[in-house]
Amino acid sequence: MLRKAVLVFGLVLVFHSICSSFAADAPQTGKVWRIGYIANSQPTTPDTQRIWDAFRQALQERGYIEGSNIVFEKRYLEGKPERAPDFASELVRLRVDLIVAAANPATVAAKEATSSIPIVMVSVADPVGAGLVKSLARPGANLTGIANFPQDLIPKRLELLRSVLPQASRVAFIRCLKCAALDPPATESARMNGWVSAPQNLGLTLAFVDLSSPQSLDDATAAVLRARPDAVFLALNPVNFFLRTQLADFAIRERLPMFAFAPEQATAGSLMTYGINYRDMWREAAVYVDKILKGAKPADLPIEQPTKFELTFNLKTAKALGLTIPKELLLRADEVIQ
């Protein structure tokens, strides 16, 4: 009888342990989490919708259902990085449980708006150099997430450009001075040093053009034409991404090969892109959100860096420009848009 009682008691303990484990891994029942969300643009196109769906589905896999136990306070910059500080302050006033911030303008604004609400950053260029965190291994304070180091890819992107356009000598480089102004001088200096040294090594000359808002698109494209370039290169920033379709249309109309950083820009019409997969990055952002909502401290969660970079070509654009992409490059591509 005693042996049977001990056995039953042991089974109860095991059952209790298993239940406790499941409880620890599941979101709090009855709790509705309120998440602030600052992104560049609304998911109004199939490619941006896929990015949002990747984030939402990754949260669903972890038990978070939008409208049920998690709600989003969504704010979109729509190509206007100067909106970020007001959006961040508004989310703090709403007392959200966590803020998800995409790219540098939104993340810098969120960090300046709160030192207590956890922040998950997505695709932030050099967060240590930007003064946002102490280190990638131990960020400290209330911020963690996924970093991006676009300056490290500058030589590779220009080498690819040279492979496609071996006779090119002058490239128009479209950047956003308003976006750069949100970064500390050291970060912008490192980025610009990469854009000065890498082209020189390949015999290329850059003509810098500023595009800091949708309203300045006409002025920027006019400046590009005055520079008489052989190609156009887009810097990594929210404005260029937001205007990806308009910029690609301009480049095709003027028969200028355009090179960019995100696969979504190739879908929009850029000739070639080389960079991170944003859907993968947002899926990883959901992992950070889950860990923090379960009690982890952002200060103790190491910041991740992308390890996979994708090469995409748009052959429809190549045909419109009368260009032939070398076969060896097409074989290396992760995606070829017909």
Image (spheres, helix red, strand yellow):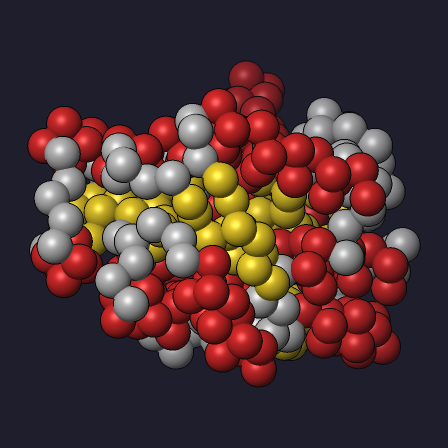
Q: Quadrant of the C terminus?
A: bottom left
Question: 211 left or right of 308?
Answer: right
| Residue 93 seen | yes
Q: Residue at x 60, y 63 (%)?
A: 210
| Number of numbered discs visible in the structure rendering | 0
The residue lying at 83 percent from left, 32 percent from top is: 134
The answer to whether one can see residue 241 in this image is no
Residue that appears at 14% across and 49% down: 323
- The residue sitting at the right extreme is 115
- Give 227 or 83, whichever is nearer the viewer: 227
Q: Residue at x 40, y 58 (%)?
A: 228
Horizontal side of residue 37 vs 158, given as left or right: right
Q: Percent from the top left, x then y, of residue 252?
A: 26, 66
Q: Nearer the viewer, residue 189 or 330?
A: 189
Where residue 23 appears, x then y in whole percent? 60, 47
Query: 324 above or below 178?
Result: above
In this rendering, the answer to whether 247 lies above or below 128 is below
- Direction from residue 191 to residue 60 in the image, left or right: left
Q: Residue 25 falls in which quadrant of the image?
A: top right
Q: Name the image quarter holding the N terminus.
A: top right
- Vertically, is 198 above or below 187? above
Which of the pair 204/241 is nearer the observer? 204
Q: Residue furthest bottom?
A: 215
Q: Position of residue 64 (x, y in %)?
A: 52, 61
Relative to 318, say whether 164 is above or below. above
Q: Could you say where residue 108 lies in the image, as x and y percent from the top left?
A: 77, 56
